[in-house]
Amino acid sequence: MFGPDLRFKPKLTVLNPAQIEQIHQATLEVLERTGVEVAHARALELLHGGGARVDGKRVRLPSWMVERAIRQAPHRVVLGDRSGERKVFLEGDKSWFGPSLDCIDYLDPLTDERRRFVSDDCRITATVADALPNFSWVMTIGMADDVPADIADRVIARQVFQTTVKPLVFCCKDANSVRDIYEMALLIAGSESRFRGAPTIVHYSEPISPLLYYDPAVEKILFCAEYGIPLINFPAPQGGSTAPATFAGEIVQASAESLSGLVLAQLARPGAPFIYGAFATVMDMRTTVFSYGAAEMSLMVAAMSQMAQHYQLPFFGTAGATDAKFPDAQAGAEVAFSCLASALVGANLVHDAGSWLDHGSLASPAFMVLVNEIISMVNQFMGGVPVNGETLALEMIDRVGPGGHFLNEDHTLRHFRDVWYSNVFDRTIYTAWLAEDGRRFEQRLRDHTAELMQHRPAPLPDATLAELEKMARHWK
Amino acid sequence: MSDTLVQISNAVIEGRVKDAPGLTHNALQAGLTAKDILDKGLMPGMDVVGAEFKKGKKFVPEVLLSARTMQASLDILKPLLAEAGAKMTGKVVVGTVKGDLHDIGKNLVGMMLEGSGFEVVDLGKDVAPEKFVDAVKKEKPNIVAMSALLTTTMRSMGHTVTALKEAGLRDAVKIMIGGAPVTADFAAQIGADAYAPNAPAAAELAKKFVSA
């Protein structure tokens, strides 16, 4: 009577096809008319040779160049874990959540003490990220205030490599740092060919909004293209200050910024793996803060995610961060909203989950645990309503009949675990809750986080650790 | 207070840029001095704007509009103030430090300082320590304000403080710093006078420095 499983993945769109086309044309217009500013000599040569109109540092990209680059880039990028297994498939509308980077401060999950983030905190956050199932990949999460700023980027990258098997998305100061981190990744992968089979690292580079490249960013783009390291070119415009205050205008500018890096990368090496996106949010005009919890951010991320799907380019999304200073009610609301929006629209590589409190300045393992829990809810919802003979259960409905119950049915036994149960959200009956110490949410979150911090990730072989130590001695 | 001055204050509070020149000319014709207009018309207006901002009632673009209104009046008053030997609130040299091209924070600080009656000399971005030194020699500011977004570039702030010391100019200015990775501890560590967490706080700090 019933055919195959008619599963429908819940889907959100915030732009209709006509709007997508209009935003696309406007983006091409910005690149062709206004262009971007690049000072880097080799990049200017490449761009000029590729057909760009170069006038001093101003580079204007004819539309055909941009559209060709969009076609040239791979439509999917697959990332591998430490063992070389292909794990994270950036394609279509699949969403993969991961944390963030560059937090200045660390919030101790057990004491709520706030202090500077140091390199050992990176070990703790990477441990928790390794333990949490909804983090499919990782970032470095914090800065390392205890080591010289010149080498801090590699110190924390090494810390993450040693602590988790998951793919790493990283940011760093220049191409020299990218090379050092790439060499660590090669060492751990075992060979260049194994690395190519399933890249374990993705570099995240930023043009400066509006429409400006500084030389180290350009060099990083060129280096990644040359070595086949997947590259995210990810501007961070703020509506009203470094981008138009209107959502459409900001999306167009952000898209132009990201795509200009795509053009450069494809000129450096056609087919270079590229991940499109922008952290488009608003400047909070009451505080001058760059908001990470704004509903408008989720709206613009969703719109850009649809642009990515239109271009068939993998997308770097943003969700799961908050402007709150603790993993509190505000944090929960902002995270639930942004994560659900991102999953619904089908953003691919969704960063900032659970590691940006206090508008991008503060990391907390407890917040990571909260966000992991929220992503579980989101994933449960995204599973949709499977419809088939088994799930429609007509035979049983008829057999049990009016006034009966389903508690003793085999069908119930087969399916009651389709329901998701939380480790920290409470559904106990009040008297039972009181009898069990009456732990409020904050306390349960703290206790569960403390357990997860005991997780011991798989260590790297001693020989690899020794080699990493040797590499570290040569960092400049 | 005369009606003219109240009108000027209100124009600033309401951000009526176009009305500022006419009101300023009226005030001068009525015999008020440039100094009076600044101290009793423009500044009280901006004080109200600052207070409203603090209460969350006015937003940054509105504060900047008020600052532009004040500037429109000051364009007329500045030559007169100079003639009379009267001074602005003070002078600030601002810049994003060497190696850093992120200037939105610095731009905001500059505009907020102007809105507080300061004369602002903006050195732009990627500003080397020696350029700060040259600007201090040439402009003789009360304050040097530096901005950085990156942990790798915030050290340039320290280098600038050192360069000012070596040039014998350290005590001639107050130094304040800001930017995402910057803290009060860092300010103390490099020998700056203070840290401001955002642009409005920078403007308040600057006012304290010159009134001290």
Image (cartoon, coloured by chain):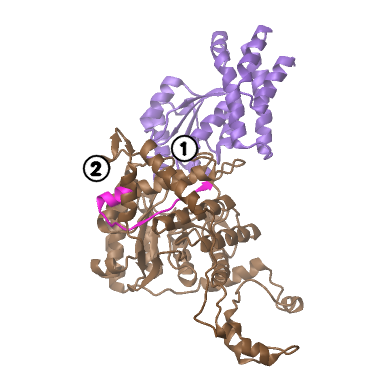
Kind of residue at disc 2: Arg
Tell me the number on the disc at residue A114: none
What subunit carries mark 2? Answer: A
Nearest to the observer: residue A7 or residue A454: A7
Going 73% across and 77% down the picture, which residue do you hit? A429
Q: Which residues are magenta?
A: A263-281
Going 59% across and 27% down the picture, which residue do you hit? B67
Nearest to the observer: residue A299 or residue A158: A299
SS at badge 1? strand
* Pointer 2 local density, CA inside 10 Å: few below 14, some 14–19, many at least 20: few
**Residue B57's spot in the image, x, y percent?**
68, 38
Nearest to the observer: residue B181 or residue B56: B56
* Pointer 1 local density, CA inside 10 Å: few below 14, some 14–19, many at least 20: many
SS at badge 2? helix
- Asked if residue A273 lies in the magenta stretch, the reply is yes
Q: Which residue is mark 2?
A: A42
Kind of residue at disc 1: Ser
Quarter assignment of residue B133: top left
Q: Is residue A310 left or right of residue A193?
A: right
Q: Is A401 rendered above or below residue A463?
A: below
Q: Residue furthest front?
A: A1
Q: Which residue is mark 1?
A: B147
Output the letter for the chain in brown. A
What subunit carries mark 1? Answer: B
Q: Quadrant of the N terminus of chain A?
A: bottom right
Output the letter for the chain in purple. B
